[in-house]
Amino acid sequence: MSEIENKQNNNQDKEEINPKSEEKKDSDAINNNKNEVTKQEKKVNSTREQMLNLRKHVPVGPGNFWNNMLSTVLLLIFITAAFSYLTDTGVKSTELSISEVVAQVKNGEVKEIIVRGSKLEVSYTDESKVIGVAKRETDASVSESLTNLGVSAEQLAVVKMDVQRETGFNYWLGQFAPYLFPLLFLGLIIWFFTRSVKGAGMQALNFGNSKARMIDPNDKNQKVTFKDVAGAKEAKQELEEIVDFLKNPKKFLDIGAEIPKGVMMMGAPGTGKCIIGETMLLTNKGLVSIVDVPKYFTVRADNTVEGLDIVAVDPETLQFEHKEASHWYALGEQETKKISTEFGGVIEGTFEHPIVVMNDKGQLAFKRLDQIELGEHVAISRGSNMFGSYTRIPSAEVAYFLGVLVGDGCLTIKDRIIFTTADNEVLKQMQTVAQIYLGTQFSKVSSSPYDYELSSVEAKARVRAWGIEETYARHKHIPEWVRLAPKEYVVAFLRGLFDADGTVESSGSVSFSSASATLAKEVHLSLLNIGVVGRLYERTKKYNGTLQQYLTIYGDFVELFEKEIGFTVAHKKERLAECVLKQRNTNINLIPHQETIIKSAWQEAVAVESRDRAFYSQSLYKNTKRYISGDRTPSAKGLQTFIAGVTALAPAMVKTTAIKQLSRLASGDFFFTKVTAVSFGKAPVFDLTVPHRHNFVAGGFVNHNTLLARAVAGEAGVPFYSISGSEFVEMFVGVGASRVRDLFQMAKKSAPAIIFIDEIDAVGRVRGTGVGGGNDEREQTLNQILVEMDGFEPNAKVIVMAATNRPDVLDPALLRPGRFDRRVTIDLPDRKDREEILKVHARKKPLQDDVNLEIIAQRTPGFSGADLQSLMNEGAILAARELRKKVGQFDLIRSIEKVMLGPERKSHVLS
């Protein structure tokens, strides 16, 4: 608490500023930096133009579809109005029947009849009368028709008859418009529709365009080099030659050496960057740990995963979005680094595992865990609002019921459910749910004024089916069927939990405490998913020396907590409402290292016109000077105020790169927190492959998952195009081949360049095994890749890199010289490493004296870390089945055979 208060006091510095001196300083700064800012802007614009030239198309997105539809409707209205205007003669007329015309002729009222096609225009002797219009009979002349209807020759003789043929623009427009305008309108709709669906969000008519993402070699935020990749020494040595080819091609060409066409990287699934199994993922099925992905999703033997949607960030727009993961990997025990942050978030992974940080230049960038130091700011994703869609819990009211039981309930006594409350509102809801869903109610315990119990075998069985376990306080957690439930169930559970164990502090914060670290962490992440950031920390209880977990919600997040979750208990609800009405400290949600960007935006805004003395006494100016000097770090709200002020001074600033970046950072999707502790250890690690985005949100942190191939491009300083093999696959024949052509065309335009195809086995399998006689869509795509790599038009300055963990299924044509000339193998653990991994997995297992892990390591060549973990587990299962208390050497020997010959490892053979 004291640390946060000190930070708030430092950020609330009230330094006085002399308006005259500051005005002069600003003027000098503007003059000195004006040219520099202009040069930088030109450089940025030039780079942006180059990047746009490399893109195949500008995404329009689904939002513009409705704008285009509205434009089409307005255009239709305009065309209709124009047609009506052009065909309108401007002369007023009255509709008549032919019998009325006959009567008027007999009465001598008609002066002239003009025949225009199928119409008669009747003029009268009384010129004040409006011209009449009648339809003529087409099977006879006008005179004959009038005579047949009783008009005498004498009466007809006084009427002037004139026949006029319709000609001119209006006539022909009237003839063809009924056919042309619908066709024109239909054509416009098709044009607008095709333009919309070719956008980034709607790919319906954009099949043939490559989905590859290009990384500019000059983009320092996304640039990766070999320094960013730990381990894999032999692989990096091989790839350094490729870098040399791209950097210095002349020295190789002078002696007749040819640049390699392709590099195939082969190795165990997911070798490299991983996180530990207890790390929580936000998925389309709710909050699950990464180790439990196979429990909730289909993971096949080749590590492909089906139906797993996660949260990822677009590095270009910084927008969070839902993306589908293609692969899940379990990679065994590895050395790890754990970083803890000021707000209580923890991430543990391998040394080379990258996460997003805010660097000292105010830019978001990926940084490896082994390079992250104390005091650095990491980016946390908040407000993802990604929840599950299925649960066995019958209603949100039952979810509230479970929240109260997790907070103040007890199920460790046989056939009983007990909870404690002093609040009538909680008691009333608990009794209602018990009566409706359990068929009984709680009764008061005589020995305690606030304890209530329900004694029923059936009721307890039903509650356990909802996910509540018979466990003590330190082992409590959010029930599985709450974690997987829709948002309303999660919110109701949290409300019940805070009604039971939550408190509104006198300082205006909301706090929650628990003896369970797992429960506190899950509540922390669930609140973060909703958008509420809390500080998670632990303290030792004075009276018994045990650790207690605390979660405290401060500042603006208190208001969001009231809006999204709140309390049911009246006195807590009233207290929370009072706190929200009070002025709160907004310096919790701070955005660091923005001095340079704010300075650039400010100087450009005030350079538009001179400012008077009063301007320099305003709070906008004073706060901006503090942001620029570093005396104050802007909060998200403070940054929003700055953006509003700057764009009011210079409206054109809204389109600048600086304002766009600041607006994204102030949007509320990011929360920045300092690294407060680091530690090292060993743990089983896991990884995901996310095509196109190559990152995913886990534990609140943004994690990256493809580095080695990008490091080659970063070292060589050339553009890098990345795409997953599965992104070539479509149901329509020829689409994959078209995407291959488009990908290579983009790379040629920016050559020298590198194309990286991840999981190439998705399209590169042996040909001739397809259902369609070896001529299916996948094989056409593969044929096009082969032609592009070594066809009639060789790409001398484009190198193709590919990755696979199934080199055995690749078509031989891919691996022959002239295509993938080089093969880089990322090896599995050697004998010494296997022995160390076995020791880690044996820590929690009682072993007999005859166990020799060195022998086991010698007998397991080719085993990955996951295989060795499975081996130790199978040994323990065998010992338990045979009713032995310890694992013996013979158990482990038998487990080797089971792991190697089991249904999931049929193709695994001894080396």
Image (cartoon, rainbow, N blue to C red):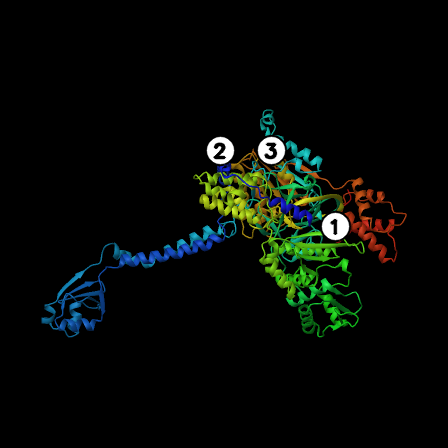
Q: Position of residue 123 (x, y in %)?
A: 16, 65
Disc 2: CA contacts within 10 A as few (<14), some (14-19) or many (>=20): few
**Which of label 2 and label 3 is nearer to you?**
2
Give the residue type that dot 2 points to. Asp
Q: Which residue is mark 2?
A: 28
**Which of label 1 and label 2 is nearer to you?**
2
Mark 2 or 3 closer to N-term? 2
Whether residue 655 sits left or right of residue 504 in the image: it is: left
The secondary element bearing badge 3 is classed as helix
Mark 1 or 2 closer to N-term? 2
The secondary element bearing badge 1 is classed as helix
Give the residue type that dot 1 points to. Arg
Q: Position of residue 754 (x, y in %)?
A: 58, 37
Q: Can residue 335 be seen at all in this image of the molecule?
A: no
- 553, 797: nearer the viewer: 553
Give the residue type that dot 3 points to. Ala
Q: Which residue is mark 3?
A: 716
Q: Can residue 403 be seen at all in this image of the molecule?
A: yes
Q: Which mark is residue 905?
A: 1
Mark pair 2, 3: CA separation: 41 Å
Mark pair 1, 2: CA separation: 72 Å
Q: Position of residue 437 (x, y in %)?
A: 68, 72
Disc 3: CA contacts within 10 A as few (<14), some (14-19) or many (>=20): many
Whether residue 151 sits left or right of residue 267 in the image: it is: left
Disc 1: CA contacts within 10 A as few (<14), some (14-19) or many (>=20): some
